Amino acid sequence: MKELLLSLVLSYLPYSIDTNTQEFKQYVSDLKIIELEPEKIELEICGAVGACNGNYTFAYDDKTNIIHVPKSCNLEEYRCKAALMHEFVHVIQNYTGKYTVDASCYDELKLEVEAYKLQNHYLNTVGINFGFISNRFSQYFLAHCLLQEASKT
């Protein structure tokens, strides 16, 4: 399933990646998908339950090249598959160097929007209007960045 989802993600993204290189093949081979309870994902990624600002159940850890998936999710179900594809976008962003530790909140927001657009596109193709890219969504994350910026001063 990993290779199939990765090829779907790559066909959608505007990145030019040579998937035949040994480096890329090793990167994909090293990628792990681990199923955990949602609370454990929050602890693993954000350091505490509730620290991830909401229902944060899927996560990509760019330091370990691991996608964390909630145990309760059936990956054959469209919404779960779409969320996993969202995390695969982050895998590719990390591989191409777009996912950086010192990125500004606004740069991170652009990466999130890219991932949500693919997630939304996939759900629309299977007849689900999930509406992730909405004004409310964008306003929430923009407000998050503004608050983060204000707290630094």
Image (cartoon, helix red, strand yellow):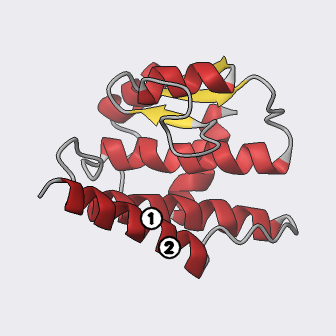
Label at residue 138: 2
Where residue 121 appears, as percent x and y from the top left, is 68, 69
Q: Residue 3, image x and y in percent? A: 61, 36
Q: Residue furthest bottom?
A: 135
**Residue 15, can we see it?**
no
145 sits left or right of 9 in the view: left
Q: Which mark is residue 49?
A: none
Tell me the residue that label 1 is attached to: 141
The picture quadrant where one finds residue 71 is: top right
CB atoms of marks 2 and 1 within 8 Å: yes
Q: CA distance from mark 2 to mark 1?
A: 5 Å
Q: Hey, what amino acid is under mark 2?
A: Ser
Helix, strand or loop status at disc 1: helix
Query: Which residue appears at 51% of the width and 55% of the height?
Result: 10
Q: Position of residue 20 (x, y in %)?
A: 40, 39
Q: Residue at x 59, y 75 (%)?
A: 136
What residue do we see at 36% from left, 35% from top?
24
> What type is the residue that disc 1 sits on?
Phe
Q: Residues within 10 Å of mark 2 (few under 14, many from 20)?
A: some
Q: Residue at x 81, y 27 (%)?
A: 72
Q: Secondary structure at mark 2?
A: helix
Residue 23 shows up from this direction: yes
**Mark 1 surroundings within 10 Å by alpha-carbon count, few (fewer than 14), some (14 through 19), many (20 or more):** some
When the figure is inspected, residue 50 is found, relative to residue 19, above or below; the finding is: above
Relative to 21, is 33 above or below?
A: above
Tell me where residue 18 appears, x and y as whole percent. Answer: 36, 48
